[in-house]
Image (cartoon, rainbow, N blue to C red):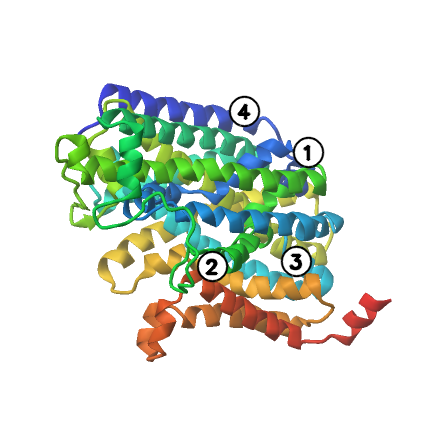
Amino acid sequence: MAESFEFLDWLVIVAYAALLFGMGWMFSRRKAENSRDYFLGKTAMPYWVVAISVLATSQSAATFLGGPDQGYRNDFTYLSTNIGTLIAALIVARIFIPKFYEHRVTTVYELLSIRFNPATMRAAGGMYLVGRVFASGSRLFLAAIAVSMILFSNIEASSIIIAAFLMMALSFLITFLGGINSVIWSDLIQFLIYTIAALCVLYILWVSIPADTTQISDALRQTPNGQNKLKLFDFSLDFSAPFAMISVITGLTLLGIGSFGLDQDMTQRVLTCKNAKEGARALLISAVVAVPVIWIFISIGSLLYIFYDRPDLMGVGNAARTEFAGERITIFMHYILSELPAGMRGLITVGVMAAAISTINSGLNSMSSVIVEDFYRPWREATGQVSDKQFVRAGQISMGLVGLALFLMAVLCFYWQRYSDTPLLDFALSVMVFSYSGLLGVYFTVVFTHRGSPTSVMLALAIGFVVTLLQQAYIVDVLGLPESWKSLAFSWKLCIGTAVAFLVCLAGNDNQLTRRATE
């Protein structure tokens, strides 16, 4: 069982809550006049703040807890995936962002309405909404497990539900009235909090190891089982290795394009800049800054390996617990629960919450923007004249509904994981990849060709999802498909799904669109 919080820990938690309430009150005084102000912040956000917001949105409690586990169990090859991220950021900055600004879209899916018809826009927006509810809801669940362990010393249903509700309520508080302005500025605060928390843990670990830099480096470079934990690049042709360079420059680059250019969660932030040039600059800065941040989390895992697995350097054996109340936990969670001094446990709790909240409040605002701009606005404007302020109110109401959906998804993840053999959590964490396959195929057709039709767009979105689903291990077993499909890394599954969706979308040929493009 985890130790009870001490006074200093509670002081850190109270200070964090007071900061969030203060931010919520400050942004509540800035009223948005119309939905474009509410969702895009009058397109006047400083690019450097947007860059940090994009970075904070791309990371979550899964990164906060999973990064150290990657460093502990494996090596630094995960850091090399940032090469694919940088390539993706360059492509999106050069090709996609100028088109979004050219057409003055509020959501990225409006581009399909301009090219084809509103039905294709709603189909893409609907796929995004379903994927984001699963992905953000499951991340909320992961963060709730960590917070429940630390805050309540258990992982009972009531504690996890309270932790999930607490984080959702805090996210809603700083998002509801201020819209995207409050999201972006709060992301800056959340980013600083969880980065500082990680740096503090890194320092505590470093000073607790009675070995010099050379000894630590040698121990990581050559482990007793022959592993090089400082390995940065994997040039093998192993198609089951998601972080091999061949995978980085293909599937992971595609994943980055989908994340930066087709996921409203990310792209909405870029669209708040003054122009396409500043939006592109924000995106590129976020991709560069991600490198040292991810290095921090992986380095924590490397030092945890020394701390727990190298008694020859520690001078004493430290037993690592891999379970908590019957549930498997990461090595970082064990360290948090058993080794951190007073005050630091509170800071790490705040760090986990900050990483989760920066992702949750982004999802609240971005999903609300898609609901209002891609679904509600076309319907209301078709029925008569509507004031701009009504769309702001609709955005706030839909944000409440989205928050409820994410909370219920987190609760569903808890019960489904406990009482079902279906690997829901694995599916939920990767569900945006399912959505990206179809979206990438469709947008590659739209951006790079003059082909496609409303029908082929709909089919491509659906088939991209289905093809990716068929390659999942549990579906392969159920349907008796080739066993080799199970060994493919998720990056290659994304490549296959995108390629099939692209060919399907390319098969459509709307003659009216072709004539318009050649005129």
**Upstream in the sequence, badge 1 or badge 4?**
4
- How many C-alpha atoms fall within 10 Å of the one at disc 1: few (<14), some, or many (≥20)? some
As drawn, 202 above or below 109: above
Task: Please state, as top left, top right, bottom left or bottom right, where the N terminus lies in the image.
Answer: top left
Q: Quadrant of residue 48?
A: top right
Give amino acid for label 4: Met
- In the shown orientation, is residue 325 left or right of residue 99? left
Mark 3 vs 4: CB contact within 8 A = no
Mark 1 in CB contact with mark 2 (< 8 angstroms): no
Sequence-wise first label, 2 or 4: 4
Q: Position of residue 457 (x, y in %)?
A: 62, 70
Give the quadrant of the C terminus: bottom right
Using residue 191 as the reference point, say whether residue 318 is left or right of it: left
Cα separation, mark 1 vs mark 2, equals 37 Å
- Pointer 4 local density, CA inside 10 Å: few below 14, some 14–19, many at least 20: some
Residue annotated with mark 2: 247
SS label for mark 1: loop
Do the numbered discs 3 and 2 sit on residues whose CB atoms are within 8 Å? no
Q: Earlier in the sequence, mark 3 or mark 4?
A: 4
Give the Cα distance between marks 3 and 4: 33 Å
Residue behind mark 4 = 26
Q: Are marks 1 and 4 in contact (CB under 8 Å)?
A: no
